[in-house]
Image (cartoon, rainbow, N blue to C red):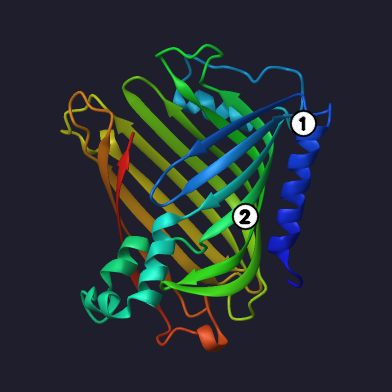
């Protein structure tokens, strides 16, 4: 893929913001943000129709999926997002600025603790544009029984750097996907899900262009006594395969477990997984020393 894709999408991003703040056609806008050690983002929602976003109070998880999949094909929401991945950036900074400390974190010939704590994120930051539909679990006047949102639509993202084994590499990339995602937060539970199909293109000749499939589901039960591990657990899996020959390129699998404390909304969590790259992921100067690479993933976090 030729050209500066990151600059191109930044121009679109800023143009849409100017349009939305300066045009009477943008009926309503909202601003939200989320803070997380691994993924922090600022979001601008633009409502494209005068109709209120549908609100659902008493729906099962399966009924929520049905509502999203069967929603109107006419987009009602435009979402502009700027995101940054703090810990992956810190891992790259540590490797470059404190190599002695970084090397001391080697657990074995193939495992580094800093790398294990920051693996799984291929870019330090990105800008994104989402166009699709949304349903609300948050009433107009917020009350205790629920909040959160569900989405279904198309996402275009871009950035100008790539992270490989805590090394930041200059690479203008662009990514397009169709996805269904959401966060449903109640007084005693939190449910998050994401299902997506997409493609990613790179200007760096040593990084393979891929198609991918991904799914994630995570549940937190603040009242659970912890006896059943499914009450406070999650799973994420993403499979990348090459665009040229449809060969496996990368498997990314993570399991997470939460540890709620009685009477507290802050929940310690730990995710454990693997990142398996085949010899098809990188080529040229970026080609892996071995044909295959397994990377341990450890992600401590706090949910609230």
User: Residue 241: in sight, yes or no?
Assistant: yes
Q: Which residue is mark 2?
A: 198
Dot 2 or dot 1: first in sequence order is: 1
Q: Nearer the viewer, residue 33 or 164?
A: 33
Mark 2 to mark 1: distance in Å?
20 Å
Q: Quadrant of the N terminus?
A: bottom right
Work out whether residue 296 can be spotted: no
| Quadrant in which residue 104 is drawn | bottom left
Residue ID at (52%, 45%): 41
Give the residue at mark 1.
74
x%, y% of residue 81? 61, 44
Looking at the picture, does residue 284 appear above or below residue 115? Answer: below
Q: Taking 188 as reference, is 34 left or right? A: right
Q: Position of residue 43 (x, y in %)?
A: 59, 39
For label 1, the SS is loop
How far across and how far down the image is residue 211, in percent? Answer: 61, 62
Q: Residue at x 64, y 80 (%)?
A: 205
In the displayed structure, 225 sits above or below 300; it is above
Q: Quadrant location of the C terminus?
A: top left
Is residue 240 rendered to the left or right of residue 24? left
């Amino acid at each position: 893929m030729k050209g500066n894709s990151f600059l191109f999408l930044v121009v679109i991003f800023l143009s849409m913001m100017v349009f939305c703040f300066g045009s009477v056609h943008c009926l309503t806008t909202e601003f939200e943000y989320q803070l997380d050690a691994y993924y922090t983002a600022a979001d601008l929602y633009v409502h494209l129709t005068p109709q209120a976003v549908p609100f659902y109070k008493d729906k099962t998880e399966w009924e929520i999926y049905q509502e999203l999949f069967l929603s109107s094909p006419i987009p009602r929401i435009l979402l502009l997002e700027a995101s940054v991945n703090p810990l992956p950036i810190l891992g790259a900074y540590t490797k470059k600025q404190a190599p002695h400390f970084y090397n001391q974190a080697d657990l074995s010939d193939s495992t580094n603790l800093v790398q294990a704590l920051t693996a799984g994120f291929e870019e330090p930051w990105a800008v994104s544009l989402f166009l699709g539909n949304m349903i609300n679990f948050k009433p107009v006047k917020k009350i205790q029984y629920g909040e959160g949102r569900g989405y279904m639509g198309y996402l275009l993202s871009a950035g100008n750097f790539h992270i490989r084994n805590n090394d930041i590499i200059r690479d203008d990339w662009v990514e397009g996907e169709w996805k269904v995602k959401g966060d449903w937060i109640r007084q005693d539970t939190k449910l998050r899900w994401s299902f997506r199909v997409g493609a990613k293109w790179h200007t760096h000749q040593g990084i393979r262009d891929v198609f991918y499939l991904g799914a994630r589901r995570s549940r937190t039960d603040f009242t659970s006594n912890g006896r059943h591990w499914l009450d406070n657990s999650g799973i994420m899996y993403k499979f990348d395969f090459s665009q040229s020959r449809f060969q496996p390129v990368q498997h990314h699998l993570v399991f997470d477990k939460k540890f709620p404390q009685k009477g507290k909304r802050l929940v310690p969590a730990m995710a454990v997984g693997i990142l398996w790259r085949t010899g098809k992921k990188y080529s040229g100067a970026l080609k892996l020393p071995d044909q295959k690479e397994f990377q341990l993933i450890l992600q401590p976090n706090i949910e609230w």
